[in-house]
């Protein structure tokens, strides 16, 4: 059946065709670019360290291990038990350090303090340091993030 | 010359410059800041070209390559020092340039777009400073960049993505360094040059703004030709400023701390470049929580709102002679006061 009046002119049809075509090409180009510039980095679920390397930490002192591209801090308590934290400040992401003489974790960027169990006690940090979970299996020291079996 | 002119038609440009007139009034002095900014931009482009010959934008080598520029490469230390100091001079002049236009309302109709491209050029320059600061890859610049790139995270919804885009991942790593280098030497220069072309074209097209008082009294202002009279006067200023910059660069070269270590605790006394200090302090003085959002989010949103208002200033200030115009001018002075107080505060 032939329509009496066209719904759009030939010019409109061609503009729409070219516009849609250019749009589709752009979308096809933009998608890989976006994927490319946002890498799909994932934090490790667990890291496996050699227990022998960390066995000799003295009570009330700490040692750093790599947790992905962040520092992890392994700390021995007075009773000999171990605790592990992600060693970045919960305020603005600076690396923190454990100061044994003060029995506190310290972030130098904005003067943030956490107690020896990683609880934020003074300065801008809004949350405690992130705890990680430790298990020892044979010669391995396994450090896992929360909720990983 | 005539052979080239026949093909390029350059005489229309030179003729234009010869006929271009600069109005002389008590605020003419601020017109000198524009070309002085350009001077320091050109110095940075030239010194930047040379620094690239030795600089290596990868994690393992960045810091050592800057150390090599500072110690081994003949006159490398002074090139880096001039590059860094001319950035400081350029940003300082940008503040003066924008504030003088704000206070004198030189952005009045029809110069709104000149202002807006100017604000974009200003933001480009700040991004140049921010990305350039990381390149020596020492522990101070590393920690400052960790903080700086973590701040957008406070913006609702898109914040997380902005942080990832800047860092090239979850954390500041070697990828961030390479990314910042690419932004610093390739992406920003292209943006800046395009914006600059539009900005300069608009200034030529619309001519120099004259002060509100003179416009109202309709008194004819004295004018001098742009070429050569005004350019010669500018040249005197360029020479003086270049001399001062070079002198400061020789006596106070920028330092280079030890190479950044991704695992090491942040050093004490981290701070951003001086022109970010008042924003930095603004972030610091906000309480941890404000009503139902975190203080950080509130501060970041406020700063963002400030930038948007600043960008649309000519649109907001559409009745420059009335009460609103006076408030806009007063807010410029308030801004200066605020920025000065917070900068000093952050240094205490």
Image: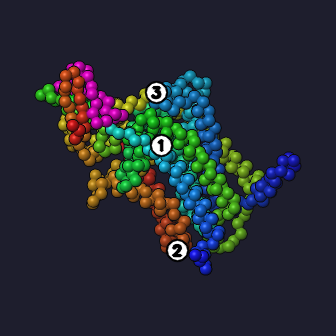
Residue at 45% in and 38% down:
B176
| Farthest residue, direction bottom | A4
- Badge 2 marks a residue whose secondary structure is loop
Which residues are the magenta region?
A: A44-70
**In the image, residue B252 lies at what x, y percent?**
52, 33
Residue B258, quarter of the rendered image: top left
Residue A142, picture quadrant:
top left
Q: CA distance from mark 1 to mark 2?
A: 52 Å
Q: Percent from the top left, x then y, of residue A74? A: 24, 30
Q: Chain of mark 2?
A: B
Give the foreground label among 1 and 2: 1
Determine the CA span between mark 3 and mark 1.
23 Å
Residue B65 position (above or below residue B83):
above
Q: Secondary structure at mark 1?
A: helix
Residue tagged 1: A36
Please identify the quarter of the rendering in which residue B198 is found: bottom right
Tally the numbered discs: 3
Task: Identify whether B264 is placed above or below B133.
Answer: above
Whether residue B81 can be seen here: yes
Query: Residue B85's spot in the image, x, y percent?
Result: 55, 39
Tell me whether marks 1 and 2 sit on the same chain.
Answer: no
The disc at residue B60 is 3
Question: Mark number for residue B322?
Answer: 2
Q: Residue A93 location in percent, x, y?
A: 34, 41
């Amino acid at each position: 059946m032939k329509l009496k009046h066209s719904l759009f002119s030939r010019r409109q049809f061609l503009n729409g065709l070219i516009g849609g075509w250019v749009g589709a090409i752009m979308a096809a180009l933009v998608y890989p670019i976006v994927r490319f510039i946002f890498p799909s980095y994932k934090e490790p679920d667990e890291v496996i360290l050699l227990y022998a390397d960390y066995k000799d930490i003295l009570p009330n002192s700490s040692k750093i291990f790599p947790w992905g591209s962040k520092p992890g801090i392994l700390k021995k308590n007075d009773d000999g038990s171990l605790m592990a934290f992600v060693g970045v400040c919960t305020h603005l992401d600076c690396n923190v350090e454990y100061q044994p003489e003060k029995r506190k974790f310290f972030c130098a960027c904005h003067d943030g303090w956490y107690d020896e169990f990683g609880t934020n006690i003074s300065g801008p940090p809004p949350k405690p340091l992130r705890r990680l979970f430790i298990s020892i299996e044979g010669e391995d020291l396994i450090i896992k993030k929360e909720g990983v079996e | 010359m005539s052979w080239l002119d026949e093909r390029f038609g350059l005489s229309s440009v030179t003729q234009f410059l010869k006929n271009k007139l600069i109005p002389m009034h008590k605020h003419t002095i601020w017109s000198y800041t524009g070309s002085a900014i350009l001077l320091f931009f050109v110095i940075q482009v030239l010194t930047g070209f040379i620094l690239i010959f030795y600089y290596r934008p990868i994690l393992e080598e960045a810091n050592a390559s800057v150390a090599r520029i500072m110690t081994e490469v003949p006159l490398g230390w002074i090139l880096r020092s001039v590059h860094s100091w001319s950035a400081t001079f350029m940003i300082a002049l940008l503040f003066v340039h924008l504030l003088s236009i704000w206070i004198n309302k030189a952005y009045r109709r029809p110069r709104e777009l000149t202002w807006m491209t100017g604000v974009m050029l200003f933001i480009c320059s700040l991004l140049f400073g921010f990305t350039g600061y990381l390149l020596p890859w020492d522990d101070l610049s590393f920690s400052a960049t960790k903080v700086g790139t973590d701040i957008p995270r406070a913006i609702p919804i898109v914040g997380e993505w902005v942080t990832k885009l800047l860092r090239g991942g979850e954390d500041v790593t070697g990828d961030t360094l390479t990314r910042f280098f690419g932004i610093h030497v390739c992406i920003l220069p292209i943006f800046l040059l395009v914006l600059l072309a539009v900005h300069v074209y608009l200034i030529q097209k619309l001519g120099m703004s004259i002060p509100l008082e003179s416009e109202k009294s309709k008194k004819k202002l004295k004018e001098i030709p742009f070429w050569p009279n005004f350019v010669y006067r500018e040249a005197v200023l360029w020479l003086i400023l270049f001399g001062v910059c070079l002198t400061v660069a020789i006596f106070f070269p920028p330092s280079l701390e030890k190479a950044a270590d991704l695992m090491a605790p942040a050093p004490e006394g981290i701070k951003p470049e001086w022109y970010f200090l008042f924003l930095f302090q603004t972030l610091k003085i906000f309480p941890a929580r404000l009503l139902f959002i975190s203080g950080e989010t509130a501060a970041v949103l406020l700063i963002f709102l400030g930038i948007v208002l600043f960008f649309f200033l000519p649109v907001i200030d559409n009745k420059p002679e009335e009460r609103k115009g006076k408030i806009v001018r007063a807010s410029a002075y308030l801004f200066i006061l605020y920025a000065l107080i917070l900068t000093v505060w952050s240094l205490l």
